[in-house]
């Protein structure tokens, strides 16, 4: 998992204001330059040049327009810093402001690399989901038999159409769109595949990753939230490793923890929640409850059954709040329902005497 760096917003007026401030002889009282400041500025500018050069190579290969914009702003700030360095009229105040500008350019370059790396990650995820959807469609066709009824035939045709649209979007580098279409179409085709716990956990893994990616876009400047998302991403990687090894119980526990951490990070966001992200979170919760229900029923634990029913009540409340546009309250109800479901699952595995 890449480690994100802070995003710094740069307005077009910043460069002009910085230049005007630094070059206007009447704007400040002249102060003699300190050779140490000039040497320090030169060193900082050289370091930024090296970072900009490396960032350019990464952004050129993987970057989207957002990454290119960040890098362009970085070059603008760096040029302003260099023009101050070259000015014979620059004072010590100008030199120190120039150091600040070149450092900001450095952070913008690092931000551009992060965005480009994120784009590469999305491309990889989109390709994986496309391949999985292709396999799932082939499996659904095989299960449908030689003479499927019209409803089944239409669903298969729709699945094929969406797969082709997703491939076209992939070719045009609309990777978020590919991920969304692939996940939705995969759910559509699930009716043709015999459900099993491992498949359900795989779906939970994919959907939680998708939810995490949405949260990353909303928490670009929320450091506490991004740290939580990094923890969740590590848990998802570990859960996937357990699934591949056939260890479903620890995989499920890690998935539950990761989802809760992602939701906690989303609650830290200062920007309005994305309604589609809340929808995905509620659907994930419903899947979790459905996955837990058979074990709770088989356990014979009355307390576990009661907890699960209470969880369903909170899920219904969350859905109602979502329809009313109360997204934060909906997520809070979902959190309560998830905790109750987790407790019910624990009681089902280890009934209390």
Image (cartoon, helix red, strand yellow):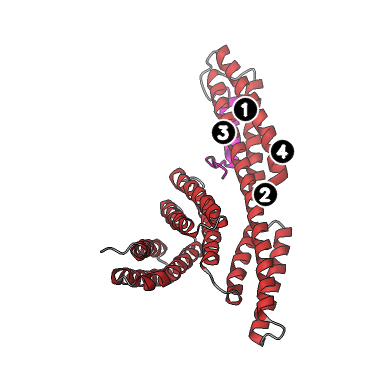
Which mark is first along the chain, 4 or 2? 4
How far across and how far down the image is residue 38, in percent? Answer: 59, 17
Discs 1/3, front: 3
Answer yes or no: is residue 327 visible. Answer: yes
* Residue count near mark 1 (Cα–Cα under 10 Å), binned few <14, some 14–19, many ≥20: many
Task: Say whether marks 2 and 3 touch (CB < 8 Å).
Answer: no
Q: Residue at x 60, y 16 (%)?
A: 39
Discs 2/4, front: 4
Which mark is first along the chain, 3 or 1? 1
How far across and how far down the image is residue 266, in percent? Answer: 44, 54
- Quote the CA–CA distance across marks 1 and 4: 22 Å
Task: Say whether marks 2 and 1 touch (CB < 8 Å).
Answer: no
Residue at the spot of label 3: 104
The quarter in which the N terminus is drawn is: top right
Which mark is first along the chain, 4 or 1? 4
Residue at the spot of label 2: 64
Which mark is first along the chain, 1 or 2? 2
- Quote the CA–CA distance across marks 3 and 4: 19 Å
Discs 1/4, front: 4
Residue at the spot of label 1: 81
Which mark is first along the chain, 4 or 3? 4
User: Going by the picture, which residue comes out furthest to the front?
Assistant: 353
């Amino acid at each position: 998992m890449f480690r994100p760096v802070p995003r710094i917003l740069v307005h077009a007026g910043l460069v002009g204001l910085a230049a005007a401030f630094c070059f206007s002889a009447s704007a400040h009282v002249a102060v003699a330059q300190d050779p140490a400041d000039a040497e320090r500025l030169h060193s900082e500018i050289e370091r930024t040049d090296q970072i900009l050069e490396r960032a350019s190579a990464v952004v050129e290969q993987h970057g989207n327009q957002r990454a290119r914009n960040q890098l362009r702003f970085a070059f603008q700030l760096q040029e302003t810093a260099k023009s101050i360095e070259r000015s014979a009229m620059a004072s010590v105040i100008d030199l120190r402001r120039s150091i600040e500008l070149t450092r900001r350019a450095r952070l913008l370059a690092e931000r551009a690399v992060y965005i480009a790396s994120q784009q590469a990650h999305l491309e990889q995820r989109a390709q994986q989901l496309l391949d999985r959807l292709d396999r799932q469609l082939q499996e659904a066709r095989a299960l449908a038999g030689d003479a499927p009824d019209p409803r089944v035939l239409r669903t298969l045709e729709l699945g094929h159409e969406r797969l082709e649209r997703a491939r076209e979007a992939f070719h045009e580098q609309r990777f978020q769109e590919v991920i969304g279409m692939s996940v939705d179409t995969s759910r559509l085709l699930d009716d043709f595949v015999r459900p099993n716990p491992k498949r359900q956990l795989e779906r939970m893994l994919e959907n939680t990753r998708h939810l995490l990616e949405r949260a990353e876009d909303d928490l670009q400047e929320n450091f506490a939230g991004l740290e939580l998302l990094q923890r969740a991403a590590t848990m998802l990687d570990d859960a996937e490793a357990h699934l591949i090894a056939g260890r479903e119980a620890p995989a499920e526990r890690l998935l539950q923890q990761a989802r809760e951490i992602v939701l906690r990070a989303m609650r830290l966001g200062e920007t309005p929640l994305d309604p589609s992200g809340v929808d995905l979170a509620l659907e994930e919760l419903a899947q979790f409850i459905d996955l837990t229900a058979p074990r709770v029923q088989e356990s014979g634990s009355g307390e576990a059954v009661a907890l699960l029913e209470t969880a369903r009540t909170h899920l219904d409340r969350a859905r109602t709040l979502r329809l009313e546009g109360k997204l934060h309250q909906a997520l809070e109800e979902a959190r309560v329902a998830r905790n109750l479901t987790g407790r019910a699952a624990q009681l089902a595995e280890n009934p209390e005497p």
